[in-house]
Amino acid sequence: MLALSDDPSISEGANGQLERLFAFVGKQRLTQELSSLERVFRTSWCPPGEQFSLSADLAIPTVGLMSLSRNGYLREAAVRRLIESGDCSVIPFLLLRLRDWVVKVRDLALSGLGAVLQNKSRDASVLEELARSLPLLFLLERSPKCSASMDLITDLCREAVQFDSKSAIELVLSGVQCSSWLAKLVLEHCLADSFLPLLHCEDERIAMMAFNSIRSVGESGNLIELGIDDFPALLRELFSSKHTELRVEALRSYFAGFSANRSDELAEVLKESLFSERAGVRALAQYLLKGENIEMLFRARLQNLSHRLDQFEEVKVSELVVCLSCMKQFGLTVENEEMLEPLLMHSSASVRAAAFEVALFQCLNRGQEDQFLAFLYRCLEDGSGKCIKVAIKHLDSKFAVDFKRVAGYIQREPLAKRSLKLMPHLSKLDFWQALSLLLFSFNAACLDDSDDAKKRIVVCLDNWLRKRNSSFVRPNQEAVQRARAAFNRFGKNLSESLRVPLEAVLAQEQS
């Protein structure tokens, strides 16, 4: 009733409150207001021939809220009043009642909706209401109660998307629940240039749907007529997409559209794609460049980078990582070893890990034991998860690794965090090599009071004890002695169910 006040500030505030209340349609808070709103509705419902007491602006929202009442007779009366108004703003209320649990109310809402749409002849105000109701239409299309009105709902969805494709695309890009459904509608009923933004959607499936639609239109018709003037330029733009599949398909389409006299330009594109941070793009480029000396391409790129030793921080991280990884893949060595030093101190852990892997690989191939071990311990000391993963992978080498020193890195702060970093990679070692590391890790977890780390180590030890007879070869005495020393030092912290069988296994191996 405050909305009827003569004071503009009071009436505006009350109307604003009604709008906020309407935003909570379907929420529990709304039901708390229904009893008072019912009274307003009943007192406002005048006998035939008398003027309706509520203002036109207030009547429809109030009666619309009554159409959500638990009382079926009241919902039916409210729906009839909404239909009588003939205003397009009743469309969302009538759409909601298409899911009503009372068949009579559903049928009334369906016939009333048809009448309102027919009277308004699909003018702009109707289409605007439909466009704002797209998420609601999505829910209705999936409701079994709306089977009788499905044809009408489908037509409304199509008209809403065609009328305001921009709003529909904004809804898709916002990540609402109905994103995929809306994207299909847009791609089916709108021009290609209107759904170009979908190529940059966070959802890879939607981005691929948009790309496949554009590509199919290009194969069957003229893209220029649909607003896409330069398809190759669009494909080149997609080379930097965050979605791997989209990058690969864009490169494939770009390649397929080239003629023989443009092969040089294509070769340049493919050579640049060799250094993509996406493995799928690199693999496709490598396949399409068959016959080229790819190894020399990588060597030349790294050599070019070596001329900018003091500017490594300005080079793209992905370019450095890919270049280093591919050097190792093709068995290429870094001729200028001084070039590795700034890479080993790079701010990116990915670059440092790739550089350590190249350095370890080179030392291993050249038989440089001292340099190999120095790089290995330095890699462990780095502390980042990626560098520790590289170090663990190289512990099982032909060189004499000091496992006591390796375990010392585990004992540093933060103890439990360092232990958990090692855990996923210890399975790559023979268990007799990993046993002492696990025991040191368990002690570190005890000191740091990390139950998570302790549980994971216990599971690892238990699994080994059950699989030991079939999965592991007999260890050498040095590995057994290392494990025995670690067990004597830290075994007392283990539970008896683990400590007793471990002690028996160690005694058996020593004998």
Image: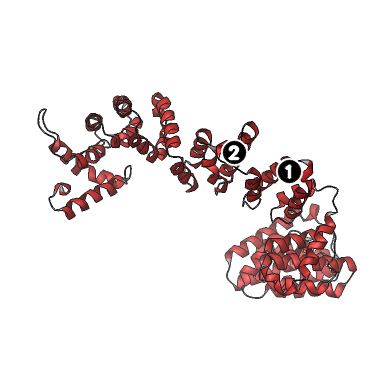
Label 2 vs label 1, nearer the camera:
2
**Residue 224 visible, this orientation:** yes
For the point 36% across and 38% down, the residue is: 128
Amino acid type at image mark 1: Phe
Q: Position of residue 63 (x, y in %)?
A: 22, 37
Horizontal arrangement in the rendering, residue 38 relative to residue 463 (left or right): left
- Residue at mark 1: 255
**Residue 489 visible, this orientation:** no
- Residue at mark 2: 224
Question: Please, what secondary structure does the residue beneath circle 2 have?
Answer: helix
Marks 2 and 1, the one that precedes in the sequence: 2
Foreground residue among 10 and 456:
10
Q: In what quadrant of the picture does the C terminus appear?
A: bottom right
For the point 76% across and 75% down, the residue is: 405
Quadrant of the image occupied by residue 258: top right
**Tag 1: Cα neighbours inside 10 Å, few (<14), some, or many (≥20)?**
some
